[in-house]
Image (tube, rainbow, N blue to C red):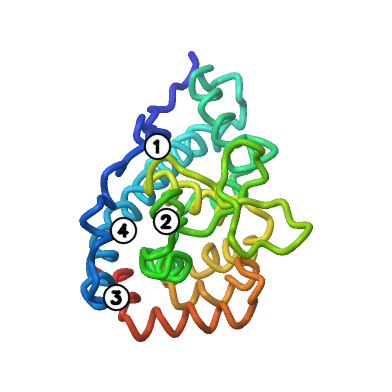
Amino acid sequence: MKFTVKLLLCAACCGILGANTFTDDFFIIKNSAAQKREFVKRMLPLIKKANENIAIERKTIDAFFEAYKEDKNLSLIDNKTLETMQNLATKYNISSIEDARAFKHKVAPVPISLALTQAAVETGWGKSRFFKEAKNAFGQWTWSATNGLVPENREEGKTHKIRVFNSVQESVNSYMLNLNRHTAYAEFRNLRFLLDGEFDGLIATSKMANYSQRREKYVRLLREIMINDKLIRYDYL
């Protein structure tokens, strides 16, 4: 008899959520302190939702390996579960569904304070035109011929654009997937796995030099904003 792993993935993992979070009333706020408070208030549930979706994926993965560890026989796993695992492996750039280590390193939440801080830096606390027009909260690029906004000060010879998203939630989901699968953030994932529950946003900043051409200056900026604006507390609420 084949063993069936209970699937825990939900449609929200792939759906577009939070489409109306940053409405016009946000962009007319003039007071900087008020805008910062409102930015955090509106970004926070989107970041939490993205992490919740990752947690659902992780439960599915853990259930699979719990069923698989005794016999290590894929023929005992039902086809639907195998298909789900293959889809997750493709999503996270994992070569084999039997690679438990890769799944544990890549499918894990991102510290809330890190996401809040990077969103604040990349959008100027929601003031950038790319945030308003492209719903891009993390400065993500694209080389698509049809999807993207050309940066005003793009260097001559460069072809990248600022990626356009359908919602800010979609941007948050894409940001977390980028940190969880791109080779540039392997050290981030390794440290997260090593420290497990002790891994917070302040520690995570040390592995964010690859996120920006400013390298270590960018890391120092993240730490400064995270501390000065007391964003680290959101990792412990």
Residue at 56% across / 49% down in the picture?
149
Q: Quick one: label 1, few (<14), some, or many (20+) residues within 10 Å?
A: some
Residue 236 on image: x %, y %: 29, 71
Query: Disc 3 marks which amino acid?
Result: Arg
Residue 131 tag number: 2
Of the image marks 1 and 2, the number of the one nearer the N terminus: 1
Res 209 quadrant in image: bottom right
Q: Nearer the viewer, mark 4 or mark 2?
A: 2
Q: Is residue 217 above or below residue 96?
A: below
Q: Circle 3 sits in a helix, a strand or a loop, which is it?
A: helix
Distance between the alpha carbons at the discs numbered 3 and 1: 26 Å
Of the image marks 3 and 1, the number of the one nearer the N terminus: 1
Q: Which residue is mark 3?
A: 233
Query: Disc 4 marks which amino acid?
Result: Met
Query: Disc 1 marks which amino acid?
Result: Cys
Q: Nearer the viewer, mark 4 or mark 3?
A: 4
Residue 13 tag number: 1
Of the image marks 4 and 2, the number of the one nearer the N terminus: 4
